[in-house]
Amino acid sequence: MKRMGWLALALAGVLALGGCSALLERSYSSVEPYAGKYWDSGAEDTLRADSYQDLVNTLLLIIEQRSESGAIRCYGGLSYTQAMDARVEVRQETMLGSYLLEDMRFAYEENAAGGYFTLSYQITYREDAADMDSVMTLSDSQSLVDLLRLAVREGHDRLTAQFAYHMSRENVTAAVESLWREICENDGDTQLPGTEEGDSPSEPEAPGEGDAPDGEAPPPDYPPCPWTVKFYPDMGSADLVEIWLEDG
């Protein structure tokens, strides 16, 4: 990608309201003018990083633009070990990296006289990843239930959504399972995945004598939820969730 075209797109992403918080997902420092901070004036079409955090930020900007190859010059005493640590952090601890990346590789070339080393990167992206511009941002777990209910009704095989605020994985899992129970209890308005039209969930058997105390009916015996829920990153909170309604 030509430098100026890449730069214009990156500037738009960096300056967009809320873009920095979504892209730079930890307590990153305020964004300085992109052209002055991340382009190396001594080499055309080459990015630069002067600190570990610069390198993480630069990699995230590269991923956001779906760049597949290029070079980053690393200054300021950065080491190869730090470069590998930044690669792991981006791939495993950030929403964009954990969701979009299939693979990220670096070739290392040191320039002792110039006081820097160059990382030539090659990035492979998931072919089945959703376009991030089309991924809906939700505020709570009930919004996820509403969106998932619509996806089931319309026969989609997958739902991908991100949360505007940190959401616990437990809340997301509970919301998904609550919709599954709702579908199992429905009156036929929503067809269960994997069933023929006109089929209905089996009614729980009537309790026999002694099955429950005080004559109470036992809780319904729902079939296991067949949907697969994946979290990106695969850590404590649910920043981006991908729900496969069919085998994925």
Image (cartoon, rainbow, N blue to C red):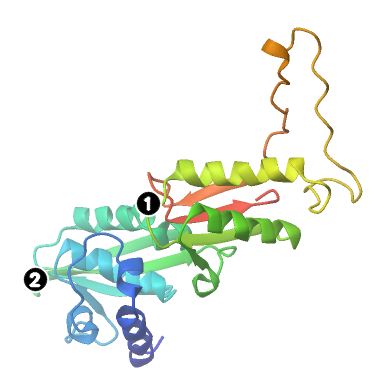
Identify whether 73 is placed above or below 235. Answer: below
What residue is rendered at 18% in x and 61% in y? 52
Give percent across and percent down for residue 209. Answer: 80, 8
Q: Quadrant of the N terminus?
A: bottom left
Disc 2 crowd rating (10 Å Cα; few below 14, some 14-19, many 20+) is few
Q: Which mark is residue 237?
A: none
Query: Residue 227: in sight, yes or no?
Result: no
Task: Check the image and name the residue furthest to the bottom.
Answer: 4
Q: Is residue 45 left or right of residue 156?
A: left
Give percent across and percent down for residue 30. Answer: 18, 73
Q: Is residue 133 left or right of residue 44?
A: right
Contact flag, marks 1 and 2 (Cβ < 8 Å): no
Query: Residue 163: in sight, yes or no?
Result: yes
Mark before the other along the chain sequence, 1 or 2: 1
What residue is rendered at 35% in x and 89% in y? 8
Residue tagged 2? 115
What residue is rendered at 65% in x and 46% in y? 179
Q: Regarding mark 1 in the picture, which secondary structure is present there?
A: helix
Residue type at mark 2?
A: Gly
What residue is rendered at 75% in x and 63% in y? 154
Using the numbered discs, state the Cα–Cα distance from disc 1 to disc 2 in whole angstroms. 30 Å
Identify whether 50 is placed above or below 163. Answer: below
Where is residue 65, by image quadrant? bottom left
Labels in figure, total? 2
Identify whether 98 is placed above or below 46. Answer: above
Q: Is residue 60 left or right of residue 188?
A: left
Residue type at mark 1?
A: Gln
Give percent across and percent down for residue 75. Answer: 13, 70
Q: Nearer the viewer, residue 124 or 111?
A: 124
Residue tagged 1? 92
* Nearer mark to the viewer, of 1 and 2: 1
Q: Regarding mark 2 in the picture, which secondary structure is present there?
A: loop
